[in-house]
Amino acid sequence: MKHAAEDVVESGSTQDEGLIRAIGTGALSLNVVNMVVGAGIFVLPGLVAAELGPAAIIAYLLCTVTVALVFLCFAEVGSRVTRSGGSYAYIEEAFGPLAGFVASFLYWFGYATMADAAITVVMVDAMTVAFPILGDTVTRAIFIIIMFAFLAAMNVIGVKSGIRVFIFNTIAKLVPLLALLGAGILVINFEYLKITEWPSLSSLGAGTLVLFYAFTGAEAALSASGEIKNPSKTVPRGLFLGLGGLLLLYLGLQTVAQGVLGPELANNTDAPLMAVAVEVFGAWGATLLLAGIVISIFGAVSGDMLGAPRVIFASSLDDNLPEVFSRVHPKYKTPYVAIIFFATLVCALALSGTFKYLAVIATGSLLLVYLGVSIAVIRLRQRDGLPKAGEFRLPFGPLIPLSSCTVVIWLLLQMPADEAISIAVAIIVGVAVYAIRALIRKT
């Protein structure tokens, strides 16, 4: 197998890919926060309150258990498979190239590309409130192109530059949210937090599904596994630190929103945190949260610019995508072709503005990837034995990965038939692309 990165050497689950390992525990945990805290957090409290009212806290706890089970599986597999690609690499290592390619396609195209393009449109729409000139079609297009050219350039120059971008964005997006959390706690009406009626199982399932979507994205931080320092320790530590911080932030914001707005929270599903900010800070609070929305979305997109191209790069290394995507920049040691391709694709979709309906595929696609990673834990243990010394090992035998599979399947069963059909079509497309690629290689 010939690749543009001539110095690639495979050894089991580890590769010398020609990339620089520069991502430590702090950077990884910050990227987990950055990738998860996107546009959803600004509408999440109202949506969950509409389903469950003050009992929303139960769904948060249930969702936290679900996410914890899934990412415990990520932690073990991520400490064993240290090459680039994240969840794609884990599934490919356990089940072979076809399963890995489908997982890769579902992730980088069905989830990351469509979701990034969609939230870019949301971000520019929000900015139009403050800068009406962005309502002009030409100006809007120029702004989007410049933004993705900047992000691509920063990530091509080097992974450290990409890390600086998402660290800055993560800190900047958290400032208004933490300010709202700190000030909001002081004006909570605790009467609004009393649970007067326990939700039904179906309502709890619906609320948990919404919350699960809000927690998605942490796996993107592992796509740059080939550039993580000491991954056997950094991966589990970074994941748990990031997810722990997210739990505290989400619970705090939901409590503040419920405690400040009370029953009105359930009627405010478009911009509940903006309404809370107006109550807490006054009229300028809406401006503060508007800035938070823009920074939050830009941070999520910049984080994906670091992670998603590594999935394309890793798939090319495995000869599942054209060889050109595995090229490493001779000076900056980054997968520059994959970065430019991903940025161009997302930019094109964001310019079209016609893809929002595909967002429904993103959740199901990601859940299937989560299911594959959970099963991969069992498969790798069966084939290669328990994790070696220095690698993260889950306790209680197969209990945690089996529990993870159970809750993910339960969440998949909450989805309507139309979405399930859309996901099936995405899988069929992935298999077809893989078959065509295999045929081209033979001929």
Image: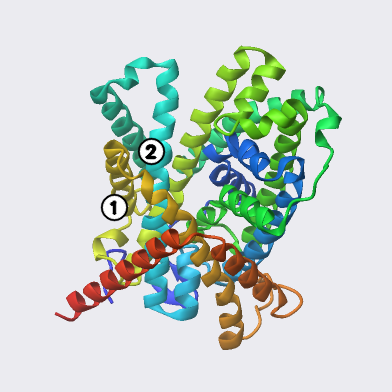
Viewed as shown, does residue 311 lie left or right of 340? right
Residue found 63% across the figure and 58% down from its top: 234
Residue found 46% across the figure and 35% down from its top: 298
Dot label at residue 226: none
| Circle 1 residue | 337
Residue 95 visible? The answer is: yes
Residue in front for this viewpoint, 305 or 363: 363
- Distance Cα–Cα, label 2 vs label 1: 14 Å
Instruction: Residue 153 in the image: state x and y as whole percent.
Output: 34, 39
Instruction: Residue 407 in the image: state x and y as whole percent.
Output: 64, 67
Dot 2 or dot 1: first in sequence order is: 2
Instruction: Residue 299 in the image: state x and y as whole percent.
Output: 50, 37
- How dense is the environment of label 2, judged by Cα within 10 Å: few (below 14), some, or many (20 and up)? many
- Work out whether 307 lies above or below 279: below
Badge 1 amino acid: Val
Badge 2 amino acid: Leu
Residue found 32% across the figure and 21% down from its top: 135
Residue found 35% across the figure and 54% down from its top: 335
Within the image, what quadrant is residue 127 found in? top left
| Circle 2 residue | 151
- Work out whether 12 lies above or below 153: below
Q: Which colour scheme is used?
A: rainbow
Q: Residue furthest top?
A: 283
Say what secondary structure mark 1 lies in. Answer: helix
Viewed as shown, does residue 304 lie left or right of 237? left
Residue 18 visible? The answer is: no
Say what secondary structure mark 2 lies in. Answer: helix
Quadrant assignment for the C terminus? bottom left
Viewed as shown, does residue 252 lie left or right of 266? right
Residue in front for this viewpoint, 7 or 126: 126
